[in-house]
Image (cartoon, rainbow, N blue to C red):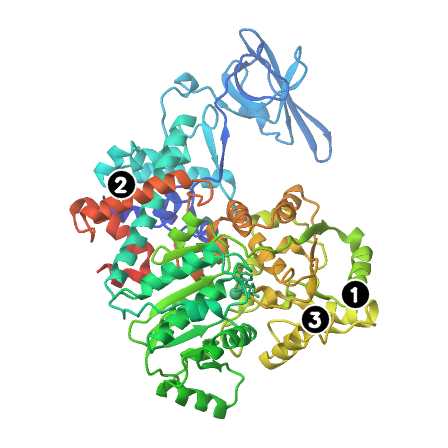
Amino acid sequence: MNSETLDTSIRYLKGVGAAREKMFAKLGITTLRDLIGYFPRAYEDRTLFKRTNDLVIGETVCVVAMAATAPQLSHIRKGLDIVKLKAVDEVGTLELTFFNQPFIKDAIKPGEMYVFYGKIEGTLIRPAMVNPLFEKQHVHDRAQDHDVASNKITGRIMPIYALTAGLSQKSIQSAALAALEKCEEDLPDILPENIVKKHELCRAGYALKNIHFPEDMKALELSRKRLIFEEFFVLASAMKLLKDGRKEKIGRALKLPQWDQFYDALSFKPTQAQMRAIEEAAKDMGAPQAMNRLIQGDVGSGKTLIAAACCYMTWKSGCQSAFMAPTEILAKQHFQSLSALLEPMGMHVGLLVGSMTAKQKKDIYARLSLGEIDLIIGTHALVSQGVSFRELALVITDEQHRFGVGQRSMLTEKGDSPHVLIMSATPIPRTLALIIYGDLDVSIIDEMPSGRTAIETYVVSERHRKRVYQFINKLALEGRQIYIICPMVEELAKSDDGAPESGIDPEAMPVHGRKSAEQADTASSDIPLKSAVEYHKVLQDEIFPNLRIELVHGKMASKKKDAAMEAFARGEADILVATTVVEVGVDVPNAALIIVENADRFGLSQLHQLRGRVGRGVHESFCILFSGAAGDQSRARLDVMRATGDGFKIAEEDLKIRGPGDFFGSRQHGLPEMKIANLATDMLILNQAQDAAHENLRSDPELKSPENRKLRAQIAQLFEINADRLN
Ligand code: ADP
Ligand code: MG
């Protein structure tokens, strides 16, 4: 493979030049490799040829015909020129009309043969095309032999690319064509030969050519399969390598405790899924390797119990646990519920958050290092310098995708290869979890504690606003509490450095900082966005002067934020106007209604998390989503929320719509973006590729053989951060 050609700049391609180079850069394309890796988002099939006596009105086809008359240009009025002519084949005629393309007059010569591509209009007696695409009839009629390098625009399947301002389909198409031609000899085949054979995959060169300019639909299918397989194969190989690297880490084998004391203290019976997760984690911690386990479960599925059980087991072995939550509010809630459960058993539970005084912190530091605290719960204040442990054997992080991988490891470094338990409330389809968290073992809690009632969900528009306000009033008078969620307008432009105090900003999630393509397409942009700050003022002053309304948003000082949250939690406010800071974990059982303004701007999984703030008590609960967008797609998307309360299903829908890159923001999970594979719909290939990757690694665990050289290089390149693990 000559990678040099692939790595040359697109600037040297015919027709690109300095100006276009800049526009291509906006699409992340600077080299020929990038361009060839920029796969079409759709295709236009221009391979259907018809004769003029066989046409169907409304069908889009190619017609081979001779220009029978000289094109007539008429200037109708300013800004309206029409060129008309008639074309004929052996069996009939086709009328052609071109609007505002006066040059056609000279481009089409009577007596010559052309291929016209367009939608059939007119009548069956006088069929017509308006503004058809056309070109001279190809020498080898009907594109029988596939020639990628040809500039043909009819008789082939044309790629449709995602565009950026200034670049036309045509310019990307011809650049892609030129790049493929130039790199013909160099298209990298990174899959080992035996795997290509075994899975009946086509060659990389064939796949790359055909993914851009498919010979026919079958070739496109084959090519797609090959490229998806390859993408998954690389990903699965990389993940397995990471996982195997980690397995060698020695850890401390903890004793399996007598569980009776623990289970007897519970006020409820654990679900089967909870029991299973506890067993899995306990088994891990009992082994002489460090546990690295993800507990995955929908909001309210009872993940905290798993954490509690693990802390209990650690304590019974005479060791300490640390539990890190993404916000102070959450840390305090965990502290309250876990100390209530574990202290009566004899455990000492402590809290460490940024807002504590220096003296309080020092006291905690001392007790931690002496081993007087068995379980410390806190924010990322836990990773600060002063914190040291006597015997840290378990590290738990809640909502892990909000922590950088770095922060997690800073905490584990405070122990001697402690066991690690990660809890994620974002339900991800299992296969995806295995890929994304490929270097972790996964326990999935797929069962809800009994007795939960479904949250009634409505998608409404501005028209219903009055009624919604009446409903708020009614519930508030009944003593219930209400959340009103707004996107944080001023946050959209905010830089990346997160919340001032904790360094972790739940609102720095990618979902609403960036519009997905789908949202950009459908949500009409003129819906006024409700800024939490202004909205709070309007609600309090004008709409509900009778109710007590608190406000929290990510930009508030952490103390104020917590004060407002806690006031709401204590029932001292009827309404909490909030940004998505409340998305994670907070527990106010008296809250029975959540309203989400501009719901179109949120990801489905995020809406599901938000909805999980209600329905946590005995009260019948409701979720109202305000949708401003008229687009059907947007509405259909929100309807998923109405149709199901199953976080896994919702996540899967989300994944289909937005792809995994947006799912967490690639920054968080550190995975390369999937170019062609869809983690939700290409599951079958994913499974095959994963099996193949594992088999391949069994025979060559470090990918050292010549067969695996390119694969290894590719992994090193894609997973830059982890390159050291590959050496
Ligand atoms: P999450 O998975 O969202 O973190 P929590 O652990 O906070 O869920 O649990 C949600 C609520 O359900 C808590 O009040 C908890 O005490 C309760 N709970 C947990 N497990 C059970 C169970 N098996 N039966 C009944 N209630 C439970
Ligand atoms: Mg939780």
Earlier sequence position, callout 3 versus callout 2: 2
Q: Badges 1 and 3: C-beta atoms under 8 Å apart?
A: no
- In the picture, measured across the screen, residue 431 lies left or right of residue 8, that is right
The residue that label 1 is drawn on is 478
- x and y percentages locating residue 435 in the rendered image: 38, 51
Label 2: state its secondary structure.
Answer: loop
Q: Nearer the viewer, mark 3 or mark 2?
A: 3
Q: Amino acid at mark 2?
A: Asp
Q: Quadrant of the N terminus?
A: top left
Q: Which disc is residue 533 wearing?
A: 3
Quadrant of the displayed image that contains ligand 1: bottom right
Bin the neighbour count of mark 2 within 10 Å (Cα to Cα): few under 14, some 14-19, many 20 and up.
Answer: some
Q: Residue at x 70, y 50 (%)?
A: 459
Q: Which disc is residue 195 wearing?
A: none
Q: Badges 1 and 2: C-beta atoms under 8 Å apart?
A: no
Q: Quadrant of the C terminus?
A: bottom left
Label 1: state its secondary structure.
Answer: loop
Earlier sequence position, callout 1 versus callout 3: 1
Residue 117, by quadrant, is top right
Q: Is residue 308 visible?
A: no
The relative height of residue 473 versus residue 77 in the rendered view (above or below) is: below
Please name whichever residue, 264 or 5, is drawn nearer the observer in this view of the structure.
264
Q: Amino acid at mark 3?
A: Val
Q: Which disc is residue 189 wearing?
A: 2
- In the picture, measured across the screen, residue 701 lies left or right of residue 450, that is left
Question: Would you say the beta carbon of the disc 2 residue lies within 8 angstroms of ligand 1?
Answer: no
Bin the neighbour count of mark 1 within 10 Å (Cα to Cα): few under 14, some 14-19, many 20 and up.
Answer: few
Please name whichever residue, 259 or 374, is drawn nearer the observer in this view of the structure.
259
Q: Is residue 494 visible?
A: yes
Q: Badges 3 and 2: C-beta atoms under 8 Å apart?
A: no
Bin the neighbour count of mark 3 within 10 Å (Cα to Cα): few under 14, some 14-19, many 20 and up.
Answer: some
The relative height of residue 55 versus residue 663 in the rendered view (above or below) is: above
